[in-house]
Amino acid sequence: MGWWQIGTDSLAGSRFVVSPLAETVAALKTLHTAAGTHPGERAWLAAHLPAYRERLAAEPLDALLVRAALGPTWNADFLTPTPPGDRERSFEEEVVAVRACEPADAVPQLEVAVGGPVPGPLRTAGDLPHRMAGVLEWVWRETVLPDWPRRRRVLEADVVARTARLARDGWAAALDELCPGRTRWLGDGRLQVNPRAYPPRRVDGGRLLFVPVTPKQGWVSWEGSERFALVYACSGALADTTGPVVPEALGALLGGARAGVLVRLQSPKSTSQLVALTGQGLGSVGRHLKVLLDAGLVRRDRAGRSVLYEWTEAGAVLVRAQRAGTGV
């Protein structure tokens, strides 16, 4: 397995970072595999995959580059620069790091990603990082930017959920569930970052970053010994904003919007998470929660700086009875 030895200072100083570039790379990886993991992602693919394939068909060298850079077990380093982590940057600021990679380093990095020699046209193509930046700019502009406000809300809601879990249960629990099957706290300062037999790395004194993305993709990257990033997929409940079905009778009883809030509270969620999941405004969600609280259908608890809402026994009985009655 691949694991990092994390120093106490690095773990204490770690932070979550929203990265438009990481979201775009994850979108590129999803377009490349053409496989959606939930209804929302499959709908997104249906809307954008034809144009993406048309774009690559018009630029065969770009198609070769993408296939080489997205290797079976490793990404070319120039495709996934590590975010600075000091503040959130725009996509335009972040993609500069891709374009700034040394062209002479690109082919050796592609060889690592491919696990062997790269196609001849890529060896003589010139500035491959600049070309890859152009692909990423297209993916951002055509497939991510139109939906970026919603994606950003989902990413921020995921960070709220992770930090609440951290405050409630500690680092071991928070890291174990970050990327199920990939990440695991091994004890003695060791974090498993993937299941592959890569050499361990020391993260001691450097900045440790956790970067959520909405597609079901993930990878690790580092910048010398200064910054290390673990990119992970948002929890499924957040990433798939199609959400649970609201039973018709429950919608008639409470109103569709309020029922949509209630059915999502089987597990604790914050107001910002509910805003991201339902697409409703902050004020509307707050009013629905107050009514549900007054009716004894939900309760609230504090986890660190976050306030989380979940069903009371009465709320659980109501939702489950409605689901049972409709077969949902």
Image (cartoon, rainbow, N blue to C red):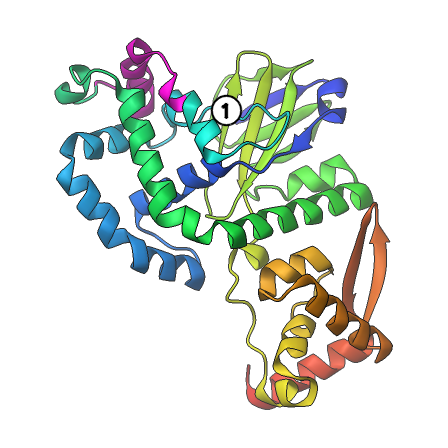
- Does dot 1 land on a helix, a strand or a loop? strand
Q: Residues within 10 Å of mark 1 (few under 14, many from 20)?
A: some
| Residue in front for this viewpoint, 255 or 315 | 255
Q: Residue at x 74, y 35 (%)?
A: 171
Q: Which residue is mark 1?
A: 221
21 up-or-down from 285: above or below: above
Amino acid type of the residue tagged 1 in the rendering: Ser
Q: Residue furthest top?
A: 104
In the rendered view, does 319 fall on the left or right side of 81? right
The quadrant where residue 274 appears: bottom right
- Residue 69 seen in the current view: no
The quadrant where residue 294 appears: bottom right
Tell me the quarter of the image containing the C terminus. bottom right
* Residue 5, horizontal then vertical, whole percent: 65, 19
Q: Residue at x 66, y 73 (%)?
A: 263
In the rendered view, does 179 fall on the left or right side of 320? left
Q: How many marks?
A: 1
| Residue in front for this viewpoint, 322 or 308 | 308
Q: Residue at x 54, y 39 (%)?
A: 232
Q: Is residue 267 magenta?
A: no
The quadrant where residue 249 appears: bottom right
Q: Residue at x 30, y 16 (%)?
A: 106
Q: Is residue 109 magenta?
A: yes
196 up-or-down from 46: above or below: above
Q: From the image, give the main secondary structure of the stretch colored magenta.
A: helix
In the rendered view, does 281 fall on the left or right side of 63? right
Q: Which residues are magenta?
A: 98-117
- Residue 240 seen in the current view: yes
* Residue 182, horizontal then vertical, whole percent: 54, 37
120 up-or-down from 219: above or below: above
* Residue 229, horizontal then vertical, whole percent: 56, 27
* Residue 258, horizontal then vertical, whole percent: 68, 77
